[in-house]
Amino acid sequence: MDSKFSSLIKPTLNTKFRVDFDWWKNQDQNWKVYLQSFLCEEHKKILANFSYEDQIDLVNPQTGEVTKEDALLYTLINHCARQPDFLSENTALVDSIFKIFLVNQNQPLTPVELSKLINRPADLILRTIGSGKVYRGIKPI
């Protein structure tokens, strides 16, 4: 199931979607360039000298467990996506959908739920992300 869905899967308005970052990383060598375009001005400057491989250590305050996270993706989800101007009505449909997944920490959403969040018709969203072509790693789960 590379760029096409299985012929047995036909997404509906109630099918949940999310960004499959692993799929996207394997399909698009420029995926981080796209992510960089969504950084807030503050983090464009801070991360300007980071390499695409940079990771940060995160410490779980309850367990003390240390995990490594992608610096760019972590910054986007935990800071930039929280800024008031991150979402805009003038954004292209696929970008709007992708940004909603960043805002919601990539929690699965249906086209109906996405429609309410970006004020676009659910059937248009379904035709776009449920068509069989995978955009920005957005896939049904």
Image: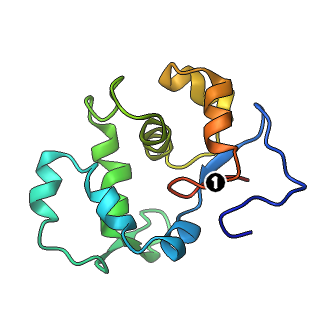
Looking at the picture, tell me which residue is in the foreground, 71 or 115: 115
Tag 1's secondary structure?
Answer: loop
**In the displayed image of the protein, which residue is found farthest to the left?**
45
Q: In the rendered view, would you say 87 is above or below 21?
A: above
Q: Residue sitting at 53 percent across and 64 percent down?
A: 21
Mark 1: amino acid: Lys
- Compared across the picture, whether 13 is left or right of 100 comes to right
Looking at the picture, tell me which residue is in the foreground, 24 or 4: 4
Q: Residue sitting at 44 percent across and 66 percent down?
A: 60
Q: Position of residue 131 (x, y in %)?
A: 69, 45
Q: In the rendered view, would you say 11 is above or below 136?
A: above
The number of callouts visible is 1
The image quarter containing residue 109 is top right
Q: Residue sitting at 44 percent across and 46 percent down?
A: 102
Q: In the rendered view, would you say 141 is above or below 131?
A: below
Looking at the picture, tell me which residue is in the foreground, 93 or 77: 93
Q: Position of residue 114 (x, y in %)?
A: 58, 30
Q: Position of residue 133 (x, y in %)?
A: 64, 54
Residue count near mark 1 (Cα–Cα under 10 Å), binned few <14, some 14–19, many ≥20: some
Label 1: which residue?
A: 133
Which colour scheme appears in the figure?
rainbow
Quarter of the figure that contains the N terminus: bottom right
The image quarter containing residue 137 is bottom right
